[in-house]
Image: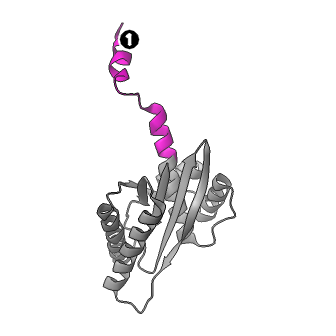
Amino acid sequence: MRVLGIDPGTSVTGWGVVEAAAGATRRVASGVISLSARASLPERLCRIRERVRELILEHVPAALSLEKAFVSRNVQSAFRLGEARGAVLIAAAECGLGVFEYAPAEVKLSLVGYGRAEKLQVMRGIALILSIEEPARPDEADALAVALCHLRGAKLRALTTLPKGRAGSVARSRLR
C-alpha cells in the first residue's frame, strides 16, 4: 500500500510518499512545496492544489493522509491552515483519492508510542522506521509522519477485519 502524507501550509507544504510491501516500509519520495511570499494567497492555494495533483498522478497512492486541523492561540493561522487544507482536499477529490485525517497526538502515538512526543522524537522515529537520515525539513517530517500513521492503522485494520462471510459464522460460534 502506498500513502501520500501532506502537511499543509500557505508558506511551505510538506509531502511524503511511503509504501508498505513485503513486510517492509520505505520512503518512496518526500519534499516540500515552497510558496512565494510575494504571491497572493489565491495563487499559493492554486499552486498547492496543482502540485498535490501532480504528486498523486506521479506516485499513484492508495490514500492521502493529513493531520486534523486544530485551533491553538492564533485564529488567523488556523484560518490559513484551513485554506491550505482545502486546496489539498480539492486536489484529492479531483483525483478520486480517499482522504484520511489523524489528530496530532494520534500520529505521535503511532510512531513513537507517546501522544505528546516532541518534534525531535518524532523525527528520530521516522528515521528509524524508514531507515533514513532524519528529514531536514520539519514540514517534510510531519508529512512522512502522517503517512506512516495511516499505513500503520491500515495494517491494524487489515489484521482485525474479518473476511466477508466470516463475521456471521464467528458470531454464531461464540453463541454456542
Say which quadrant the C terminus sits in: top left
Colour mapping used in the image: one colour
Check the image and name the residue furthest to the bottom. Answer: 38
The vertical placement of 58 against 38, above or below, is above
Q: Determine the image quadrant of residue 75.
A: bottom left
Q: Which residues are magenta?
A: 152-176
Which residue in the rendered view is the most extreme toward the front? 58
Left or right, 54 with reference to 127? left
Position of residue 124 measured from the top left corner of the image (x, y, whole percent)? 66, 59
- Judged left or right of residue 176, residue 6 is right
Q: Would you call the spot at circle 1 few (<14 residues within 10 Å), some (14-19), or many (20 or more)?
A: few
Q: Is residue 119 left or right of residue 162?
A: right
Q: Is residue 162 magenta?
A: yes
Would you say the magenta stretch is mainly helix, strand or loop?
helix
Q: Residue at x 33, y 64 (%)?
A: 89
Identified at 38% across, 64% down, the residue is 70
Helix, strand or loop status at disc 1: helix
Instruction: Inspect this view and state whether residue 74 appears.
Output: no
Q: Residue at x 31, y 83 (%)?
A: 42
Specify whether residue 85 is in view.
yes
> Residue 120 at x, y = what percent?
63, 64
Task: Place residue 128 in its image quadrant.
Answer: bottom right
Mark 1 lies on residue: 173
Residue 75 on the magenta span: no
State whether residue 156 is above or below residue 39. Answer: above
**Can you give x and y, in whole percent of width and height, for residue 119 in the image?**
59, 64
The vertical placement of 53 against 159, above or below, is below
The kind of residue tagged 1 is Ser
Question: What residue is drawn where x is 54% and y is 56%?
Answer: 18
